[in-house]
Amino acid sequence: MQHQPIAVVDFGSQYTQLIVRRIRELGYYSKLYLPEELEQVKGTAAVILSGGPRSTSEPDAPDIDFTFLQSLGVPVLGVCYGMQLLNLKFGGSVSPCATKEYGPADLVKESSVEGGLFDDISPSSQVWMSHSDTVSDLPDGCQIMGRNRDGVPVALKWNDSFFGIQFHPEVSHSTEGTQMLEAFLKKAGDLPRFEMSSFKDELAQRVKDHVQGRKVVCGVSGGVDSSVLAALLHEAQVDTRNIFVDTGLLRKDEAAEVVRLFNSIGIEIEVIDASERFLTALAGESDPEEKRRIIGRLFVDVFFDAVGDDVELLAQGTLYPDVIESATSGSAASTIKTHHNRVDRIMELKEQGRVIEPLDELFKDEVRALGKVLGLPHDVVGRHPFPGPGLAVRCPGAITEEKLRIIREADAIYMSILRERDWYDKIWQAYAALIPTKTVGVKGDVRSYEYAMSIRAVTSEDAMTAEWVHLPYDMLGEISNRILNEVDGVNRVLYDISTKPPASIEWE
Ligand code: XMP
């Protein structure tokens, strides 16, 4: 069965991606489209027009082909900007709000409206507002489904298929937002549920059709995304060379472990040991961005040295959030750190249509689910994210073999305790980092002057924000004791209690 996505048309709101996520959480397949891509949504069961930062009164405000939208004959929901745009299209008007609304607000539902979206929600429900324009004149026949506390209409039903809401149901502060989205999707009738196992077959077929017998090169890192990618290529019976670059910045025994895990499911991996090249190139460099640049460039050089210039197709484990982030121009997120998979050489291949990114419609948790149905072991799909620049971002300042040894040993102890105590799977990401400052201590009656280690554990949904994990004190004690006793060169262990923002998850 082909999965026909529920279409979310993106007018640029910071929350648009969340709409897609919520729909998928409800068990239906959904995708983002730009307004100018509307033709592509033909065949969809429902359309949602997102919010956006612009005002419909601006001369070049984003627009939609309304005739085409109506011709689809499917339910349409306008959210915020989407609602205002629809009101204009139906002949109503939009004007600046008397009072701008940002943050939580009450939705007072009109119980007289039949066939609306609020049948199952409370009479007064908390919703999340973020707007400076509002619908003013309403066209004939338009019904008001709900108002704010000031009596301003914030939810409209223009007819049996077209609905609009001024607030953001996708934001968790809209406490009954998911039910509202579900009520809207019910208007589309009996929608096919999204099943990962049949989606896997669909993806494998798509990969086969795309590859057309060409040779594929795939860089694997042992992380979830590239592992799932390699397994999908394997499933699609594509002729693939899986290359694993050992940058010398890996965790303890990582290269051997990755090879073992892949071999256990019948996938061959070529390991390129480039650790000396990386450590030489990084010697003495302490600027975080420069370190990333060195690693990024060298990684591509090493990779292409290994595969030669005759790459027919390069497979990349790009995920949906990466695609959205890079499409949102000027996104601050994309400039905070230099991600190493965006470099020129790969961009060139991409322009030539020689990059294949089969996971680019999936969120991280969906990639994990795909990995599971592809038969990857739990050790692979349940792995915490590990950044491309590896331990370099956990070793602030200049990198040395000695510092890397300390991080590896401390990290291995930390991870083994998290696993033993069944904490590993409850955490989004955990690691040990080295604080490049020596402090005074005593070891066996002798003064020591050694490094401090930072232990970090965070929960997160999408790595954009993160909370530190309240690990039990006795476990923190055990981690600290074991690191202090077993790792030479450390005399202090600190637990990192910083949220993101303002801290980031990694140290660099
Ligand atoms: P930050 O440190 O930005 O990290 O809060 C967010 C998430 O991204 C991972 N990360 C990276 N992954 N290349 C990657 O592949 C990178 O350069 C990189 N930098 C950070 C980080 O581990 C966390 O999961």
Image: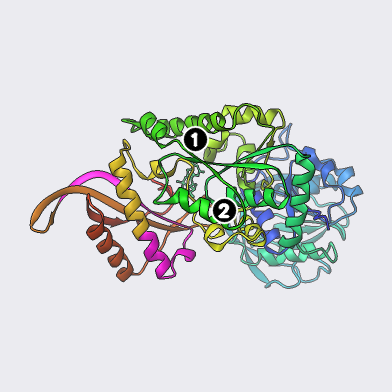
Q: Which mark is residue 262?
A: 2
User: What amino acid is labelled 1 in the image?
Assistant: Thr
Judging from the image, the colouring scheme is: rainbow
Q: Residue at x 57, y 38 (%)?
A: 331
Q: What is the secondary structure assignment of the residue under circle 1? A: loop
Q: Residue at x 53, y 31 (%)?
A: 300
Q: Which corner quadrant of the image does residue 187 belong to?
A: bottom right
Q: Is residue 463 left or right of residue 450?
A: right
Q: Which mark is residue 338?
A: 1
In this view, the mark in front (2 or 1) = 2
Using a 10 Å C-alpha cutoff, classify the residue at mark 1 as few (fewer than 14 neighbours), some (14 to 19) or many (20 or more). Answer: some
Q: Position of residue 304 (x, y in %)?
A: 56, 30
Q: Is residue 11 left or right of residue 439?
A: right
Q: What is the secondary structure assignment of the residue under circle 2? A: helix
Q: Which corner quadrant of the image does residue 167 belong to?
A: bottom right
Decide if residue 364 is in sight here. yes
Q: Is mark 1 within 8 Å of ligand 1?
A: yes
User: What amino acid is labelled 2 in the image?
Assistant: Phe
Q: Position of residue 118 (x, y in %)?
A: 74, 68
Of the numbered discs 2 and 1, the one sitting upstream in the chain is 2
Q: Are marks 2 and 1 in contact (CB under 8 Å)?
A: no
Q: Position of residue 241 (x, y in %)?
A: 62, 41
Quarter of the figure that contains the N terminus:
bottom right
- Magenta residue check for 429: yes
Along the viewing direction, whichever of 245 and 193 lies nearer the viewer: 245
The stretch in magenta equals 414-440
355 up-or-down from 507: above or below: above
54 up-or-down from 181: above or below: above
Along the viewing direction, whichever of 274 and 286 lies nearer the viewer: 274
Q: Position of residue 119 (x, y in %)?
A: 76, 71
Along the viewing direction, whichever of 280 and 273 lies nearer the viewer: 273
Q: Which mark is residue 29?
A: none
